[in-house]
Amino acid sequence: MAEFVSDNVSGIHPKVMKALQDANTGYRRPYGNDELSDRLNGVFSTLFETEVFVLPCVTGTAANSLALSLMAGPINSICVHERSHVYMDECNAPELFSGARLLPLPGDYSKLNTQSLQTVVSEIGELHSPQPSAISLTQTTETGTIYSLDEIAAIAEFACFYKMKMHMDGARFANAVASIGCSPADMTWRAGLDALSFGATKNGCLAAEAVVIFNQDFIPEARHRLKRSAQLLSKQRFLAAQLLAYVEDDLWLNSASHANSQMAKLANRLAEVEGVELPDSIGSNMMFAKFTAEQNQRLEAAGLAGYLFETGHMRLVCSWATHDEEIDRFVAAVTG
Amino acid sequence: MAEFVSDNVSGIHPKVMKALQDANTGYRRPYGNDELSDRLNGVFSTLFETEVFVLPCVTGTAANSLALSLMAGPINSICVHERSHVYMDECNAPELFSGARLLPLPGDYSKLNTQSLQTVVSEIGELHSPQPSAISLTQTTETGTIYSLDEIAAIAEFACFYKMKMHMDGARFANAVASIGCSPADMTWRAGLDALSFGATKNGCLAAEAVVIFNQDFIPEARHRLKRSAQLLSKQRFLAAQLLAYVEDDLWLNSASHANSQMAKLANRLAEVEGVELPDSIGSNMMFAKFTAEQNQRLEAAGLAGYLFETGHMRLVCSWATHDEEIDRFVAAVTG
Amino acid sequence: MAEFVSDNVSGIHPKVMKALQDANTGYRRPYGNDELSDRLNGVFSTLFETEVFVLPCVTGTAANSLALSLMAGPINSICVHERSHVYMDECNAPELFSGARLLPLPGDYSKLNTQSLQTVVSEIGELHSPQPSAISLTQTTETGTIYSLDEIAAIAEFACFYKMKMHMDGARFANAVASIGCSPADMTWRAGLDALSFGATKNGCLAAEAVVIFNQDFIPEARHRLKRSAQLLSKQRFLAAQLLAYVEDDLWLNSASHANSQMAKLANRLAEVEGVELPDSIGSNMMFAKFTAEQNQRLEAAGLAGYLFETGHMRLVCSWATHDEEIDRFVAAVTG
Amino acid sequence: MAEFVSDNVSGIHPKVMKALQDANTGYRRPYGNDELSDRLNGVFSTLFETEVFVLPCVTGTAANSLALSLMAGPINSICVHERSHVYMDECNAPELFSGARLLPLPGDYSKLNTQSLQTVVSEIGELHSPQPSAISLTQTTETGTIYSLDEIAAIAEFACFYKMKMHMDGARFANAVASIGCSPADMTWRAGLDALSFGATKNGCLAAEAVVIFNQDFIPEARHRLKRSAQLLSKQRFLAAQLLAYVEDDLWLNSASHANSQMAKLANRLAEVEGVELPDSIGSNMMFAKFTAEQNQRLEAAGLAGYLFETGHMRLVCSWATHDEEIDRFVAAVTG
């Protein structure tokens, strides 16, 4: 069943499903002119403790590409980690939406850092080069690591100095906030972000993401860009319903905390199994573990294997839905 | 409540909602690698009586723009009606996805015809002009009219002779099929279409459309274009679930028939009210009627007014959800 | 042959050729970092009586597309005449450079007017439509007519009111200035233009056009857009040399005056030939005349025929190079 | 000044200038419908010993971007060296023209190799990644090194196996051919190339490059892409004149041989000067030498300094125009 392959193998959280059903009454004006859509900006502004503008959309690729298109145009480049989702897994969508180039940069633990970013400075003002105008961080990263607030702040200082904008791909934003224990505001606009891709699908929605815009300069073009990118739903109330249910009563944070702690639980259990190599620390709902050949075979046979990398590491991800019994079954399969 | 403003003011059909709930069990591989997604090509191939390839996506704009991007590239132009949705209401998305220009052409009853299309022939082979490579019809049209099979065939002959591809924006395809009473195959590939935007959202889904590809040449690029346009859902099973429920047991056709007959019922009722101007014939679930100033005011006051055009005509649309009581209320408001 | 087919059938003016030779000494820094390129902004600022920024490029299509890309982006549309060069003869280049849609509008005498422009106002603020952000006039038009200063001013008022930018495709700007007898400033920024495509190729250069930017807001992106569009020459001194020679000593204006008066001369001569239909007035270096079938045949046989339209009119164009003897030969061929 | 900064600091070769003057007679049909343009395909087919199709354009960036747009579209990526001109110095033009992503890859001596290319193989067939469809080599490279015919053949085998197309950025193609001593055919289509950017500007033209197309599949779209990219000159006869003069009588090869041998001469002379660090071997018209601080200062003072890299190396380039006396002056400045 692929329980640990990714958090997007999970379904729709019951509370989100209920919100969809509750929204399914009567007639509502289309394209966001409904009461639920009307509440989005307010609810997210409260959550982020500042006035924000929300673009609801249906995929993380759309959210990232839309957000980046507000920060970078056809004469620009966007600094990204060379292993990031926007660079590796979005099939030119960011380039399509923005017209800009993605500049892949190295960095330990899948994280950008100012040393790495420094290499692009020589292109600023260079007539023959696209001008770096934005930096995109992924939080949590593709390998489950997390930028500390200090790390974000250091990059934000760099961005500010060189007049670049800052984006965060927060497909797993909730897992990072849950792990660090800070406020959403601390991890975003207070740290210097201009826009956030606020992920909700992996963490319990059907298909719902939100571009949360902190930089007011981005607003005039935002809704037309949403429409142009074919992400404006006619029955947008059902997208709003998902996002509202996800944010209200801390569902987003509780679900992420659950995923994180289930991953910690799995790691603790695996630590007792001979032959398993685990990372030094686990910060979020993702882990790269190394099993013996026999263990890999048993996981495969049980339908429980995660994605296996060339290094021999298996990626494991927990979600809002991960039950203890699935952990039990996984450990049992490893143990043999 | 805006009951007759559009068919997209309706909600999710109970059978579609049930399908979403049924699909919400356990863990499934993401990005279309699930059992429900696996069934799409087969189910649609049966429906269309030929082997088709389906790209599921979430908006009509996406479906149209994706389909057109398979037929027209950056040196091309696409023949469209000057009042069509792709030209008037998709905010450059078809241009973004394809790189091609939309060529707006006139035509009575919101329909393209070969006389109108003939005007683009002079650009074929002209070095300084984008080359017309595709024709996009809207069925039913933006004003509720319907291309007859003969009209489609005539345009298809033109397209074939000039080596252009044929697309149908079928946001209301079901209403047209229900109205004409032909098979889906007759209205599409047998008539010469290369691809169809098969609408489902307006007619009972949450957010689900399908690009149905008849031309096998389009397949190799299709899935990457879906991904690049940010329309590949991670939890695609829920998109497949909607489309399958929509197609199975003729839900699509029954829902459209209902919408069409409710519109006929409304028209019949209004025909008895003094002062109301109705069109000569009504073929689908849309009608443009003209009311007196007092009638317009009463409809406005009752929250039942549709979109009012400069000509004084009001657009009225029925949907799968339109009940008799809403028709009663509407007629009552008109009658005063 | 083909003397009257277009003004671009002419060669390089001797003064421009001499400037190329004079520039061909020693070594010069590339990409515009040479003494001749350095003079462009100053010389054009003097010519236009205001501080301008010049982008030198090699084709009119490039000049138009670059200029428009400074005024309109991917969520915008650009109002153009439906018979204009940018719409009819540039094969999607304006769309490529800008990402915007061209909105073709009707208008008598190949000219836009405020009535025609008024039809786009309904799209302003409309979420589903690209937002009109620019108007492009062609001066002189594709049929040789000329916008009066009052006509330009009226459109500029419209543009200003609706916050649109104004561009002029001045591939034959010189012919218009020569015809009206106003200053370049009067026809451009004083009339409300934001940027001008200042044509030089047709009127005596090898391949040289200049985007003349009046709106200072356009400058920061301008040079990078030039480079991105593959129009930045490494040996730009030879492009600057052409433009400087063209502008200095009123070569541009004298050449255009010559072309205009040769066209007037040709018209006067043809007025005496039986069977020839001439337009009421001739304002520039272009004319659409109608000949008898025998006359057309004789012109064809003599290799002197211009482009023949479906209406039976033949387009005739004079250039800086048109000699009296060519007029003699043409009239002789018509006379038979 | 700046004699050794680049080969594009040189002017127009007298034979090319004479060709421009010779072409400047009478009237010619525009946009390539002239006798000189008509000869291009034939002359280049003879030169390359196979039937080729030529797109004449004015910048190397245009030639590269056009050629790549024939091999890679919006769902593709193009393998390039991370220090190549197309990646470093063309400001997103290849992306603009093609819609594809450039994939920067490492490689010693500024050259791609199959080990480096192997890293992209994992993306083939991967739905979330742009599909690698082309490889672009630069010959000679940005650091003056040269791909041997064996190296090209090895990459071509790789390209063929993975169904990728092969492009060569030959801005300094002539210098490579002159250095290796092979035929143009051997270095291009016989080695597996699909298209070549054949540089002429640096090596004696005003502004002239040619996309030489070997793959017949590229031809149908080629001319419209030329027009769309704003590179179709109205007075194209002057572009054809340059290219014909450049190719006839081996001017291209003789000029490149001269540049190469002048660079060898300069290196030999510098080898005798104390403190100068020279590369082991010199293959083309470019060299990276290291001087002492005093030598650098004297070169700077004499206006003879080339571009100085962070490593302390100075780039020096000879051209068709480099005289012995300039070498004398350079050596004198170094010697002090």
Image (spheres, coloured by chain):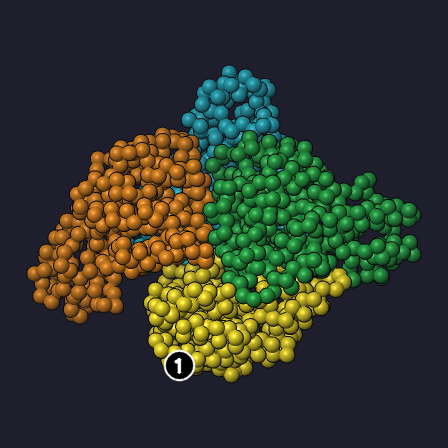
Chain colours: A green, B yellow, C orange, D cyan
The x, y position of residue D37, in whole percent, is 36, 54
Above or below, comparing residue C293 to residue D227 in the picture: below
Q: Chain of mark 1?
A: B
Per the image, the residue denoted by label 1 is: B272
Crowd band around label 1 with a 10 angstrom C-alpha radius: few (<14), some (14–19), many (20+):
few
Position of C152 compared to B181: left or right?
left
Closer to the camera, D308 or D102? D102
On the question of residue A111 being in view, the answer is: yes
Residue in the image at 55% along x and 42% along y: A51
Front residue of this view, candidates C74 and B217: C74
Q: Is residue A104 left or right of residue C281?
A: right
Q: Quadrant of the N terminus of chain C?
A: bottom left
Residue D257 at x, y = what percent?
A: 49, 39
Query: Residue reaching furthest bottom?
Result: B181
Taking the image as shown, residue B305 lies to the left or right of residue B116, namely right
* Residue type at tag 1: Glu
Q: Residue at x 84, y 54 (%)?
A: A324
